[in-house]
Amino acid sequence: MFTQQLINGLALGAVYALIALGYTMVYGILQLINFAHGEVYMIGAYLGIIVLGMLTASGVTAYSLTFSLLLTVLISMAFCALYGAAIERVAYRPLRKASKLAPLISAVGMSIILQNFMMLAQGKEYKNLPPVLPSIGLNILGANVSPAQIFILSSSVLIMIVLHLFVSRTRLGKAMRATSQDRVMAGLVGININQVISITFMIGSALAAVAGVMATLYYGVVHFFMGYLAGIKAFTAAVLGGIGSIPGAMLGGFMLGLIENFGASYISSVYKDAFAFIVLILTLLIRPAGLLGEKSVDKV
Amino acid sequence: MMARLCKVIFVVAVLALSLVACTKQDDTVIRIGAAGPMTGDQSKMGMDLKNAVELAVAEWNEKGGVLGKKIVLLAGDDQADPKQAVSVANKFINQKAVAIVGHWNSSCSIPASKNYNDANIVMVTPATTNPYLTVQGFKKVFRVCGTDDQQGRIAAEYVIKSLHPSKIAIIHDKTAYGQGLADYFKKALGDKVQIVYYGGIIQHDPDYKAVLTTIKEKKPDLYYFGGIYPEAGRLVRQAQEVGMNIPMVTGDGVFDPTFINIAGKAADGTYVTFGKEPAGLSSAKAFLEKYKAKYGESGPYSIYAYDAANIILSAIEKTNSTDGAKVADYISKTTFRGAFGDISFDKNGDVTQAPYVVWQVKDGKFQQIP
């Protein structure tokens, strides 16, 4: 039972971690909490159901499941990356020199717009996808690790490694780190700030898209409102790990998934959602910088 | 220039508003309300209800309406939310509706019923099964379906007699309907079976694996769920994923093909208590064909909503009145010939016969257990 709960929690946490990365990356660069990020996750989930549905209808899924899953993830990532770049261009860039509150309000507005857009475009009902993956997978210490969980855990770990290498080893990653340390200075030494910010949004949104497709596969239901709660929980994960810190977001995501799962099973399933917010409050009270966050020096 | 233009627009807007406010409700029509969750995850149920009432109203209008007046259908979306349900009820009262078919959810019907009863409006619900609705002493509130205590008892009797479990887990969705049903089931079991788990889950939560794993550990022979199909679908699907292969037993809220769509193969073996199959009834044939031609396949509660609308309209016709008290009095004393068979009410407003039977999902379809 413990092993099963551990695996359930890790799979749930992987989804939170992927969304949290988008929050933390954007915060690192712009000191902005992108509240529309949860909606990008929701759009990714819808794309997952649409693309996978189309592939199933055209017989591709029956021919090769791995190929169609990969294709679904890639298409969803591409679309959401465009959404991310567009959101930044429309809602945040014009406000970059405004007071800090303005882009925050703009973010909330963007979130409402995207939710309602999806409601009008896709309908108010739950959309469901009959299970594509079998439910019985590996047996590890008496716990059933379903193929969906294997897919979620392996691909999220892979993506996190790639992301880490990208940020720490590539030129563009270096430019991102430089921009996050000092935007003005980075611009002076010849880094194209707008481009770096756009790319950050695109990467964050593509990660949310992966999380969305995973949630679709895992739960089989999507809804235009699903991004709201998932977004807030991922934000909690980002705060727990230390907002602005990439390894922190990963750690925070997995931890939150585990806390929710163990809380729901050992304490009470009725308060499952409450655990996330208790964690948020405790983090802010005890360690506002988060587990891996650095003490922030106010930039005046 | 700009300021002047703004002034003109403002004046026009105020005038337009006051015009709207002055429009008098004309008394040449009779208004019937249909209320249910028409958006959100239970929207299918609300639309099934509304379509069926619309069909009944259209049939009456073809025959010349009622009391020589045309019948107009008002639709109210309560979003399966108790607060919205009360605001829908107030809206109907302001619009001078004479009777209501609805609401769908117990948590909506119960608070709204007080508003209707106080406003002298007859309310006939096609689907609310929580017993509390009709024991509040409201004379103008009726239901054409059964109640959860009957349903819970029939489920418990079936489980004990045919499935012989020694341990049972019970979960519910914390709503008036779900928790009520789960409690009646638990009560009906008595001490014949050991209950190893009893607890609630959060509606709309995508992930129920934590609670399912806890239940699996207690090794029950089956689990009972009081709730609605979106949650039930996710529960059976995830139960299989955590390796729990025991059947779910549940109530009428799960009786919808969407449950099977969400759950896939995992739905097979689920037991559901529900009314008899209407397709076999000769009285239902005309309704089912008409509904199918106009809206597609009818929902589980469409036929109940259709009967509810017909009961209201024929009572208005027979009493020659739209007075709620008179219409309610007539309804309580009369046996109606509905599409679903003869319907009569007891002193509370419940149907005298509530024929629940047990169904099981087999090969992706609900099948009545003989």
Image (tube, coloured by chain):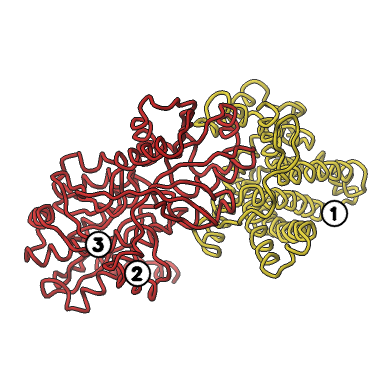
Chain colours: A yellow, B red
Q: Do the residues under discs 2 and 3 have CB atoms within 8 angstroms? A: no
Q: Quadrant of the N terminus of chain B?
A: bottom left
Which residue has dot 2 on it? B288
**Dot 1: element:** loop
Disc 1 versus disc 2: nearer the observer? 2
- How far apart are the two marked residues, 2 and 3, measured between alpha carbons? 12 Å
Lateral position of residue A75 relative to residue B313, left or right: right
Left or right for A11, reference B231: right
**Residue at (31% x, 48% y) in the render:** B128
Regarding mark 2 in the picture, which secondary structure is present there?
A: helix
Q: Position of residue B239 (x, y in %)?
A: 59, 40
Judging from the image, mark 1 belongs to the subunit labelled A
Q: Kindly indicate whether the residues beneath marks 1 and 2 are on one polypeptide chain.
A: no
- Chain identity of mark 2: B
Residue B135 visible somewhere in the drawing: yes
Residue labelled with disc 3: B307
Q: Earlier in the sequence, mark 2 or mark 3?
A: 2
Residue A216 is tagged as: none
Alpha carbon separation for disc pair 1 and 2:
66 Å
* Residue type (three-letter) at the residue carrying disc 1: Asn
Q: Chain of mark 3?
A: B
Q: Is there a contact, CB below 8 Å, between mark 3 and mark 1?
A: no
In the displayed structure image, the side of residue A21 where residue B290 appears, left or right: left
Mark drawn on residue A192: 1
Residues indicated by labels 2 and 3 sit on the same polypeptide chain: yes
